[in-house]
Image (cartoon, helix red, strand yellow):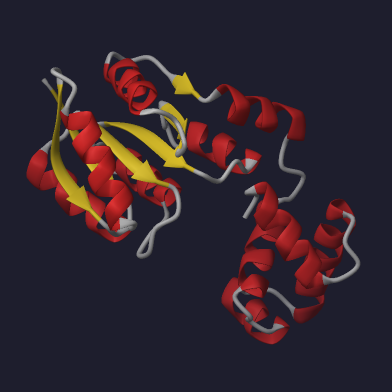
Amino acid sequence: MIRILLADDEHLIRGAVAALLGLQPDLEVVAEVGRGDEVADAVERNDPDVAVLDIDMPGADGLTVAEQLRDTGARCAVCILTSLGRPGYLRRAMAAGVRGFVAKDASADVLAAAVRKVHAGGRYLDADLAATAMAAGDNPLTERERDVLRLTGKGVDTGRIARTLHLSEGTVRNYLSGAMAKLGESNRLGAVRAAEKMGWI
């Protein structure tokens, strides 16, 4: 029996997925949580074989949770369930050791097959999401440019960004200008939106 933890903040969707997976003779949903910051404790308590994580949750997003599970040496395989086809997400998921990346509109049979595959040590990548990621190419932003754009997107002003990242305000402005140029945007908020759309921040 493959033991599964489900993490999704949409209660109805989580319940439906749990019910459908529960119909499979070799799958058992042993835990359900609605927030990303509840996953680590649930993994420790229930020792699942596979964690199926929504990408967009309160507390911590699915990719951050996957990185935390990797860093703490959790034994469970991770499968990301998402309606967001952002190419940067797929690349970040792969870097975090995620073995499955399934579209949220996939059938229960597809998700069950993905769970079985990642549990067996394989990988499952939704073909459309993989094709989109390949077509988009690599993230052109440096780590510092991503940091600056993330904080800008949260409404943090240049001075505070500089203090937070231990940079001068001029350097912060230079990072913003560089990011805007790479993304083909004329202002910082446009650059934030473009980077978010691609899943690069």
Horizontal and vertical percent for residue 199? 62, 49
Residue occupying image coordinates x 14% and y 44%: 31
Q: Quadrant location of the C terminus?
A: bottom right
Q: In the rendered image, is residue 23 in sight?
A: yes
Q: Quick check: 127 above or below 152?
A: above
Q: Quadrant of residue 151?
A: bottom right
Q: What residue is at 50 percent from the left and 31 percent from the top?
A: 94
How many marks do you count on the picture?
A: 0
| 115 vs 16, nearest the viewer | 16
Viewer-proximal residue among 81 and 22: 22
Q: Position of residue 172 (x, y in %)?
A: 75, 72
Q: Quadrant of the N terminus?
A: top left
Judge whether residue 137 can be spotted in this image.
Answer: no
x and y percentages locating residue 170 in the rendered image: 82, 77
Q: Relative to residue 142, is residue 180 drawn left or right?
A: right
Above or below residue 85? Residue 27 is above
Describe residue 151's horizontal placement relative to residue 103 as left or right. Answer: right
Image spot of residue 57 (x, y percent): 39, 58
Nearer to me, 191 or 102: 102
